[in-house]
Image (cartoon, helix red, strand yellow):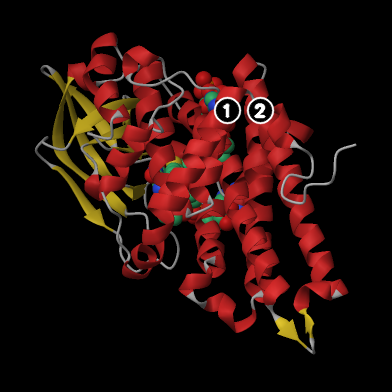
């Protein structure tokens, strides 16, 4: 007879492969030993340490699902999710850096790029030597990317790009940007390199969320992009959305990692906090809150795990990704807010971590398709009517 494990109540670990368990352990060790000690200062000072990309490259976390010839190690979707879970247990901003590089910058080159593009960029991106970013959102309404204004015009030997992107993770430190722009009214993907004339990036400051991640804009002023840098394999919104499928899936795991960290921190805190002569953990109200947190976290992880196995076998649909991205971000945010409350005044300090997670999860709930936008994607699938 097995005993109940409060930290793994549905014994998810037993259903992972040996490789997946080893990858999770490596990610957990790296996150705790290398990321956790610097996150409080990074969040306070609003800085992102570029060296993290190189470290993640050395750990094999960047583009991990890609085949070996492109620098990856062909790990499963579940393994990718477990990396996201462990990194985001430290900070959503660090998971952002990993998922943008893997799912939003490397994946489009892998899925839609020419062989020459793959060999030129992917191994160096996997090593963290080149940092990529993903430019889809524009200032006038991120939820509706079809309305983008950025334009490409065909010219001798390539294209001229004009326009701009906003809210772009890693753009100020990026060596290349995957820019989505309309060419004759059809959305196409372009690999825009840092050295191209007219390509500029600026940092967005004063964020109260995801402060350990660097976010910026992209300016495109008559940028010449050679034909060799057009992604030949895709036309239309299917291009960026295919990348978002991978990233949103990873966020479903990552958000639960942040929630899990809050749950563990809160369990420790209420166990030690003496009030009215007894530990706070001995109170019914407190125990109910811990039980609610645990239940939401492990249901969310089960959903992410089931989805990962569907992605591994190819039997997935985008709506299932919307369901898990939406549910897990919303639930993680609620867990983090509750954790902050249960820490009392101490919960507002940096060293307790829980309020940082709650602030970060506000962004995670919004980016990659806002919470209500995913409800509308599901609503359309349920009713057959588009309510956007
Ligand atoms: P819709 O008519 O639904 O679709 C247009 C075309 O796209 C195809 N498609 C998909 N293909 C693959 N996967 C999916 N999930 C797809 N969803 C749609 C669709 O089949 C169609 O193809 P075709 O060939 O028929 O043209 O398009 P719509 O304009 O009605 O879309 C509405 C809506 C709301 C669903 C969509 O615009 C949306 O998802 N909005 C949210 C935008 C978003 O998620 N932006 C994310 C920006 S990147 C980011 O946030 C990164 S943060 C990263 C970090 O730091 O971690
Ligand atoms: P809006 O689209 O203006 O939405 C505002 C509100 O309206 C939301 O609550 C939304 O749910 C709601 N809403 C929208 N449409 C409807 C409707 N039809 N009916 C009812 N309600 C609706 N983008 C990138 O391309 N690359 C990146 O790397 C990237 N990184 C980001 C990093 C950060 C820190 C942040 C904050 C954002 C990032 N984004 C990135 C952009 C992100 O994807 C957008 O913020 C997101 O898609 C929402 O767009 P918006 O901010 O313009 O909000």
Residue 36 in which image quadrant? bottom left
Specify the quadrant that holds the N terminus: top right
Please tell me which residue is depicted at 12% across the width and 16% down the height of the picture: 157
Q: Which mark is residue 73?
A: none
Q: Is mark 2 on a helix, strand or loop?
A: loop
Residue 369 position (above or below residue 92): above
Marks 2/1: CA–CA distance: 6 Å
- The foreground one among 89 and 157 is 89
Specify the quadrant that holds the C terminus: top right
Residue 39 in which image quadrant? bottom left
Is the residue under label 1 in contact with that under label 2 (CB below 8 Å)?
Answer: yes
Residue that protrudes farthest toward the top in the picture: 115
Residue that protrudes farthest toward the right in the picture: 1
Q: Residue 16 carries which label?
A: 2
Relative to 170, 323 lies left or right: right
Residue 191 in which image quadrant? top left
- The foreground one among 212 and 138 is 212
Where does residue 277 sit, x and y in percent of width and height? 79, 88
Residue 92 shows in the view: yes
Residue 135 position (above or below residue 356): above
Where does residue 206 sit, x and y in percent of width and height? 34, 69
Relative to 302, 183 lies left or right: left
Q: For the image shown, how many numbered marks are present on the structure?
A: 2
Please tell me which residue is depicted at 9% across the width and 38% down the height of the picture: 197
Where does residue 379 sit, x and y in percent of width and height? 73, 39
* Mark 2 burial class by Cα count in 10 Å: few <14, some 14-19, many 20+: some
Where does residue 258 sit, x and y in percent of width and height? 57, 53
Residue that protrudes farthest toward the front in the picture: 1
Q: What element carries label 1?
A: helix
- The foreground one among 45 and 33 is 33
* Mark 1 burial class by Cα count in 10 Å: few <14, some 14-19, many 20+: many
In the rendered image, which residue does mark 1 sit on? 20
């Amino acid at each position: 007879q097995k005993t109940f494990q409060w930290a793994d109540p549905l014994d998810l670990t037993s259903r992972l492969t040996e490789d997946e368990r080893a990858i999770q352990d490596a990610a957990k060790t790296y996150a705790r030993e290398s990321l956790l000690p610097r996150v409080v200062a990074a969040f306070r000072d609003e800085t992102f340490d570029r060296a993290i990309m190189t470290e993640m490259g050395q750990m094999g976390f960047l583009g991990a699902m890609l085949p070996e010839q492109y620098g990856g190690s062909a790990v499963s979707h579940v393994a990718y999710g477990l990396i996201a879970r462990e990194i985001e247990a430290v900070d959503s901003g660090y998971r952002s850096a990993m998922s943008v590089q893997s799912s939003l910058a490397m994946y489009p080159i892998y899925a839609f790029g020419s062989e020459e593009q793959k060999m030129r960029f992917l191994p160096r991106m996997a090593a963290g030597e080149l940092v990529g970013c993903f430019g889809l959102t524009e200032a006038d309404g991120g939820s509706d990317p079809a309305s983008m204004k950025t334009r490409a015009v065909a010219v001798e030997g390539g294209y001229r790009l004009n326009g701009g992107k906003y809210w772009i993770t890693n753009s100020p430190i990026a060596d290349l940007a995957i820019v989505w722009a309309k060419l004759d009214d059809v959305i196409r993907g372009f690999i825009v390199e840092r050295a191209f004339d007219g390509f500029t990036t600026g940092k967005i400051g004063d964020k109260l969320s995801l402060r350990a991640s660097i976010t910026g804009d992209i300016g495109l002023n008559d940028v010449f992009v050679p034909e060799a840098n057009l992604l030949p394999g895709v036309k239309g919104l299917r291009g960026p959305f295919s990348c978002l499928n991978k990233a949103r899936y990873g966020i479903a795991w990552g958000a639960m990692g942040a929630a899990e960290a809050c749950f563990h921190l809160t369990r420790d805190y209420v166990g030690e906090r003496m009030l009215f002569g007894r530990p706070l953990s001995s109170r019914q109200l407190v125990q109910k809150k811990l039980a609610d947190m645990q239940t939401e976290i492990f249901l969310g992880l089960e959903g992410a795990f089931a989805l990962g196995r569907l992605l591994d076998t190819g039997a997935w649909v985008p709506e299932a990704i919307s369901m898990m991205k939406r549910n897990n971000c919303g639930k993680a945010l609620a867990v983090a807010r509750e954790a902050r409350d249960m820490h009392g005044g101490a919960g507002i300090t940096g060293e307790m971590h829980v309020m940082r997670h709650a602030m970060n999860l506000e962004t995670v709930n919004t980016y990659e398709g806002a919470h209500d936008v995913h409800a509308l994607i599901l609503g359309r699938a349920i009713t057959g009517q588009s309510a956007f």
